[in-house]
Amino acid sequence: MFESLSDKLHGVFRKLRGESAMTEANIADAMREIRLALLDADVNIEVATEFVESVKSECIGREVIKSVTPAQQVVKIVHDKLVDLLGSDAAELKLDRKPAVIMLVGLHGSGKTTTAGKLALKLKQDGKSVLLVAGDVYRPAAIDQLETIGREIDVPVHVERTSVNVAAIASNALQAATRQNADVVIVDTAGRLQIDDTMVQELVRIRQAVHPDEILLVADSALGQEAVSVAQHFHAALDLTGFILTKLDGDSRGGAALSIRKVTGCPVKFAGSGEKLDALEVFFPDRMAGRILGMGDVVSLVEKAAAEIDEDEARKLQEKLRKNQFDYNDFLSQLKQITKLGGMESILRFLPGGRQLSGLVSGVDLKHFARMEAVILSMTVAERNNPDLINFSRKKRIAKGAGVPVETVSSLTKQFETMRKMMRGNSAIGRLMSGAALPEPGPGASLGGLLHAPLPVTKREQDHKKRVAKLAKKQRQKQRKHKK
């Protein structure tokens, strides 16, 4: 979502890299471009102006550090101010009573019903028992949709198809949740194409009936400034406790995410970034600021990997790596793990500077991985267990079995060797896939340092370097004799 804003901010920082010191003139130029970038991202004009003035005063008043370039100083200041703008710390749900009640509100099409299911699944994964309430009585499809979601995630849904009194339905659901000893009740409510008095009054009656612990506005991030206006209206009527931003995986400009907290004073608590029911994540301001500025989000990547990668498999792989026994079976397993994490493009987006490279593998991942899998499955058991057995004649047989050219098999064997070195070495991908801890990147960290950490040098490579050095030495000696 923030790709355009990220690119423009990178352009500003790139210009500052050529400066030897921060002056009022180059700071003024940079601030003007940052302001334009924010406005182009559909950030509220007052928020953008205040943000830029805050960054500018910090830049001018900051003591010059000789070991830090002007660009690095500005990046650090912008990062800190972005974190402040987005909310400093992740805001937790207030679920002190039992059952606690969460009321979801928003316009039609913002994704409330799907978000209700996502939130229920997240709470269930955290060990909470949840009851969903079908409160959108004006759209039968919404009730059907919520029941389908409930079955999919194994969460009960309270439905009263013959009633249109949503406040009474919510009250009955709360009583049912108390009898069932449920921890949380999530009330899905009806939306409209626009805010009207009838809609607002119905929501006020629901609030009076169940006294929700959380009233969360589900806001479509693609609406930009309109989302901020909607948030203000809902907040004035219901006293919101927070927001859930949806469709962060879209091509919207991101202004709502950067403006909504500053304008309303309410925190963004969750962000939805996909249609799948597990595509809801806690909104961490510092991580989001890091993504916007291209610093990556290694912590989120590690958390995602921890949820997807099997611990037993990771332990077995680490043991095999210690014994230098990484084979094609392990290689195939790692390809599947990468696919589970969304492919290389998805992983690169979480690493510092990786977004610039993620486009290179866009659309290639799935087809390429499928082809690689076909090649590996065309190998014999012995070949998969012992990669050194594969010579040219075996490559020809494997290529015929997989229906690919011999060059494809040769390419795969080279990629395997690269992966084997990465897994033995200290690269980010290798450490991530083998369940090891990743290093923490600081501001200005680059993908090169994380993704391509030094690889162990094999004896064959050492011998090759020695031969090259000898030949170079002989050539220099010949050149000296020729000059004499």
Image: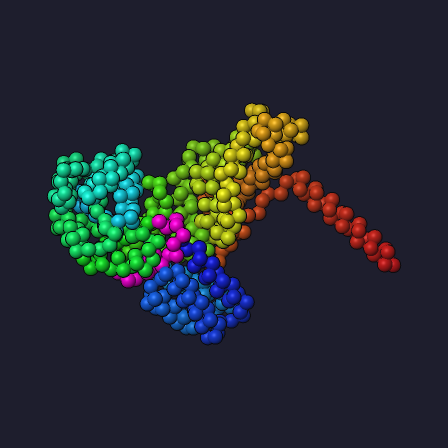
What residue is shown at x 67% (from left), y 43% (from top)?
462
Between residue 444 and residue 64, name the one nearer to us: 444
For the record, the magenta segment spans: 247-264
Going by the picture, which residue comes out furthest to the bottom?
24
Does residue 34 show up magenta in the picture?
Answer: no
Residue 459: name its quadrant: top right
State the scheme by which the image is colored: rainbow
Q: Quadrant of the C terminus?
A: bottom right
| Residue 282, position as x, y percentages in the image | 33, 48
Q: Is residue 247 above or below residue 307?
A: below
Going by the picture, which residue comes out furthest to the right?
484
What residue is shown at x 28% (from left), y 41% (from top)?
117
Report the side of 337 relative to 279 (left or right): right
Q: Is residue 32 visible?
A: yes
Does residue 258 show up magenta in the picture?
Answer: yes
Q: Is residue 439 visible?
A: no
Between residue 294 and residue 439, name the one nearer to us: 294
Report the side of 251 relative to 322 (left or right): left
| Residue 233, position as x, y percentages in the image | 22, 59
Between residue 74 and residue 162, name the one nearer to us: 162
| Residue 394, position as x, y percentages in the image | 64, 27
Residue 196: name its quadrant: bottom left
Report the side of 226 relative to 312 (left or right): left
Going by the picture, which residue comes out furthest to the top?
381
What residue is shown at x 49% (from left), y 33% (from top)?
333
What residue is shown at x 29% (from left), y 52% (from top)?
219
**Image label count:** 0
| Residue 455, position as x, y percentages in the image | 58, 44
